[in-house]
Amino acid sequence: MKSDNKKPEKKSTNPKTTLIENENREYAECVVLKPVGYPFEFNLMDDDFEIKNKELFEEYAREQWLGLVVRENSHLFDQKIIPDYGFEIISAKPDNSIISENTKIKLITDELSAKKDSTLIKSNIRLSDIVGQTNAKNKIKVITKYLEDPESFGPWAPKNILFYGLPGTGKTMLVKALANELEVPLYLIKATTLIGDHVGDGASKIHELFKKASENSPSIIFIDEIDAIALHRSFQSLRGDVSEIVNSLLTEMDGISENESVITIGATNNPTSLDYAVRSRFEEEIEFKLPDDAERLEIITNNLKTMPLKYDLDLGKIVKLTKGLSGRDIKEKILKTALHNTIASDSEIITMRNIDYAVNASKIKNSDIKGMFE
């Protein structure tokens, strides 16, 4: 009886045999790979993939794939430590060539790192979206110039900048816009998340944060509410491990680890609450101020453009009513509350009555916490 079964193809375990069989092909100068995971899935598998040492990975990959033909948009599969894990061939120079002992193998892991790293932020905000803060915008020009050409600055490079001002004045928004326009990675983190459960956790997290930023430089680290980990010494009794955290932060800010092309920006509502040793490391302090009348009018106008309901409002009066409020408060506490009140009242048009309701509600909330941190 004739069998339809084909004889299994013999695969050589000797890479040199493959080289001889394909001796008419060119050798690959460089192959760029991207990890794409397993071709199938079951509960015991984990798609996480992290390279600790790129040079060792290159040697590891080249040794097992020596003699294989590489074609762009095809795949290579690991057969050793993580069997069947797939790598897409993004480019091969020349295409349809053979991996040799001299082939450079590069790995693209940026997308994977971004997926795993919640501190890496992407944003579409532009500097033109930020109303006011002219002084802050002018002062960050040095950061722009430095990150565009780090080598030209040498020892004059800006390293540590402090943003300070009341909540909602645009500190976070400005750093997002800056990173977006410069097209550099932004590592944005709340200082409270750097505090660990055990002694040493905080220092480890700070070191890891700066390490990631350095590996992907030029980049920006933005530590919001930095006073949470860098309290003035008169408050340090509130936190038992604050000295260890502060020392770790100082080590990184001093550049002992040579964090080239990494800008550290700290943000605080009250710079006087900072430990002096930390505050002294910031070569520039940039103040963020509350919007004036013209800026509040622009903030109100810009936000009304996306309002889901029609409105009949006296903008000049709203400007006066919102004196002393930040841009965020104008949007969140006044305009949004007015919108919600309109919908709750089964109305189709936002009027000054709804604005007055929002202003009064905001005053009640503010009076409840007034003096709490004074």
Image: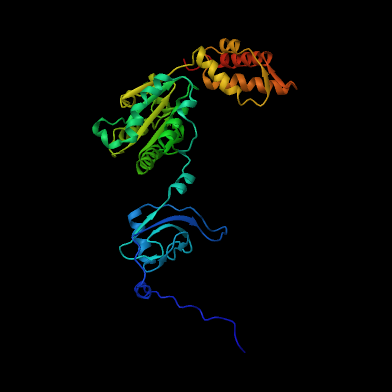
Tell me if I can see residue 43 in this picture: yes
Which quadrant holds the N terminus? bottom right
Q: Nearer the viewer, residue 350 or 62?
A: 350
**13 lies above or below 82:** below
- Say if residue 247 shows up in the picture: no
How far from the left and from the top, in percent, is residue 350?
A: 68, 19
Q: Based on the displayed image, in which of its 4 quarters is residue 120 positioned?
A: top left
In this orientation, which residue lies closer to the viewer: 55 or 135? 135
Image quadrant in which you'd find residue 234: top left
Image label count: 0
x and y percentages locating residue 247 in the rendered image: 32, 33
Q: In which quadrant of the rendered view does residue 341 lie?
A: top right
In this view, the residue farthest toward the left is: 155
**At 60% across and 10% down in the image, what residue appears?**
317
Residue 215: percent from left, percent from top: 35, 44
163 w.r.t. 209: above or below:
above
Q: How is the model colour-coded?
A: rainbow
Q: Residue at the location (44% across, 20% down)? A: 133
**Relative to 46, is 217 above or below?**
above
Viewer-closest of 232 and 216: 216
**Residue at x 51%, y 12% (from the top left corner):** 293
View extreme (right): residue? 346
Q: Position of residue 179 (x, y in %)?
A: 42, 34
